[in-house]
Structures are given as C-alpha cells and as structure tokens.
Amino acid sequence: MRALTMTKYRFQRLILIGVLTALAAFALVAWGTRPAAAQASECGSECGEPTPYPSPTYSPSPTPSPTPAPSPSPSPYPSPSPYPSPSPTPTGGASSGNSIGGLANQRFNQMITNRVLGTVLLGVNEQINCGDCISAFGSAGSFSAGIHGRKALTNNLSLLAGIAYTHYDGRGYEITSAPIGAFALRYDFTDWGSSRPFFDVGTILTPWEKARYTRSYDTSLGPVSVTSSTNASNYAVYGRAGWISRLSPRDEVAASIEVWQLWQRVSGYSDRTVAFNPFDATIADGTDRTSLVKIGGQWTHLFGSNIETNINGGWVQSFASHSGIVATVTGNGVVVPTMGNQGWFEYGGRLGFRVQKGWIVDLFANGTLGPQPVGNTIHGGVGLRINY
C-alpha cells in the first residue's frame, strides 16, 4: 500500500516537473522571439523586404534654395550676334530709271551749246555786209579760242569760216578737247540797193570730243552719283533767209529766219565702277537729233568814228526732237527717254574799239535764256579783228 502510494506520489512529481519544464521552455521561446519580431517590424518599415546582404542607407542632402540670377547690366558695346544679320536691300530703281531722262537733257543742252559756240565762227556778232576781215579770239564761260573771218568771192557771194578749240560744260556734263569748224556761203543782193534780201547756207562740225556725263539718283540707303566718260561728235546744217537795210552809213539792221538740223553721236558706255551703285546702267551707241527754227534780228551802229556796237537776238523753237539713248538699267530693264520740244531766247552783242585803221579790239558775249534743259547761259570773250 505504502509502495503504491510512493509510486503514485513519484508519478505526480514527474507530471509536475514535466509541466514546469514545458512552461519554462515556452517562456524561453517566447522571450527569444519577441526582440526578433520587433527588429523585423522596424526594418520592414524602413527598408522594405529583408535582403541577404546589408545595403547602405543614404540620408538625402538638403535641397539648396534657388537664388535669383543677377540681371545683366547693359553694355556700352553691342554684343556680336552669333549669326550675321542680312544687309538691307536698297530701293530706288524708279529714281535710277528717271536719271536716264537727266542724261537726255544733258545731251540736248550739249547740242545747243555747241551750236551757239559755232555761230560765233560764222560772224553772228558782226554786220551782214562788210569787207574782208579775219579775227582771232578767246572766250570764257566756256573756254574757246580760235580764228574766223570772211572773204568776198564775188560782189554778191562771200565765204564765212572759222575754227576753234573749245572746252565747255553744263548741268551734269563736261566737254573737253572739242575742235569746232564752221563755214557758210552768203549771197547778198547788193545790186538791189540799200534794202535787199540775203541768204546763208552753212554747217558746223565737231567731229570728235571727249564727254563726261553724270547720272544721279536716290536710293533708300542714300544718293548715288556716277560720272562716266565716252566720246561724242556734233554736226549741224542750216539755211537762213533775211532782209538787210542800210539805214545810214552808220546803221545797218537785218531780220531773218533760220532753219537748223542738229545731230549728235555719242558712243556707248557703262557706269564707271564706284563703291555704291546698286542700279547701274549701260548706255548703247546712239544719235540725238533735233530741228530748230529761229526768228531774229540785229542792229549794228557806229558811235563816232571809233566805237562799233552790235546787238542781236531771236526766239528759237525746237521740233522733231529725238533722244538716241537706249539704256539698260538694273531693276528697270531697257529705258528709252523722250526729248520734248522747247523754246528759248538767244542773244548776243559786241563792242568794238578801232585802235587804228583796220584794227579793231572786240568784246563780245553770247548766250541763251530759257527753261531747262537749255537754261540760262553766257559765253563771253575778246577778239582782235583785222580788216584788209
């Protein structure tokens, strides 16, 4: 009985020891797993899934606060552009085309001036009827120097002739190295008495001359003026019919009508090369021409026995005028200007001093009065005339 009791007691002790051992093991297991779970919880919140190798963590650097960029101060010198700006295109082609009309006016003035200088060689400042004479002269305004005179071939027929070297200019042009020759025949009906008709027929020749013409026009980038050189020649023929009256031994008056035909040949040329000429031009060979009619008169008077005077003048009208210019202008193509008809007044005069028998010193002047392109001109000079 006692042995059974002891066995039962031991069995209970074993059960109690087992239970305590199990509780102790459970407590140890629970204590060991709690920190690991806490560590896993903290790592999961910060690093995501666990990795077999520890990865370094980076703390973000503080973001710098933006600072305002300083505004550039204006520079006194412009900064160069990385790409060159295109140069502006000039305008003004229409003005360049109109300048060809200016050339036509210059050439018309040239024809008229050449004729005025040539009439001095034909005795325009002298009386209609006088004896044989020869005169050497020089003039300014347009430089001219030469000789002219007259020679009676019969009682009614006289030869008038002269030659001169001239250098003259006008509005935009200049003529140099221009020899002028002129001659005419005059038939005076002397057997009719003191009042009678007379007739002239003659020519003026300038076979060669150096010419410079200036062409000017405006563009959007400024004015342009180009002077170019070429050669020219002038020819004229005329006929004159008039009436002369010897009022007294000291006075002679005359009235007449003249018809002229003028030609002017100009060689072709191109604009001279200059720094700025965007609308350049090329001028072809061409012949200008015009017809003139003049109605005029003159009076010659002797004061005392030593002073001679002559005044002359008349109205001139051009007709059938034609410009020979055919120009090719950049931006305009072919330009052919027109040359209109025009009227103007021509005048002349002479004051002569008889220094001794047969020797006369003359002061003379000739010119034009009128609108452009003829304009107002004057050519004056001095001469020594010898009667023989």
Image (cartoon, grey):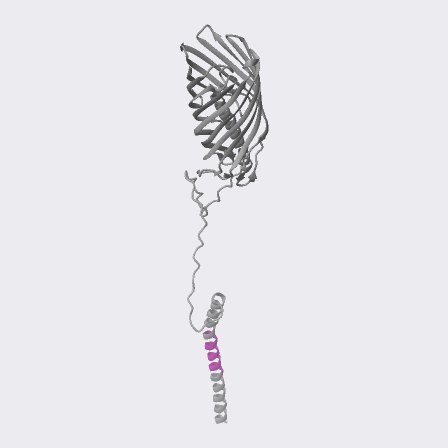
Membership of 270 in magenta stretch:
no
Task: Using the rendered image of the protein, determine whether residue 290 is visible from the camera's viewpoint.
Answer: yes
Residue 185: x percent and y percent? Answer: 51, 22
Residue 160: x percent and y percent? Answer: 48, 21
Outermost residue on the left side: it is: 356
Query: Total number of numbered labels?
Result: 0
Q: Residue at x 55, y 31 (%)?
A: 289
From which residue to which does the magenta span run?
19-31
In the displayed structure, 15 sits above or below 311; it is below
Give the main secondary structure, helix, strand or loop, of the magenta stretch.
helix
In the displayed structure, 325 sits above or below 294; it is below
Camera-side residue of 240 and 75: 240
In the displayed structure, 24 sits above or below 45; it is below
Membership of 22 in magenta stretch:
yes
Task: Using the rendered image of the protein, determine whether residue 226 is visible from the camera's viewpoint.
Answer: no
Camera-side residue of 13 and 369: 369
Residue 53: x percent and y percent? Answer: 42, 72
**Quarter the C terminus occupies:** top left
Camera-side residue of 351 and 64: 351
Q: Quadrant of residue 343?
A: top right
Camera-side residue of 356 and 378: 356
Q: Residue at x 48, y 28 (%)?
A: 205
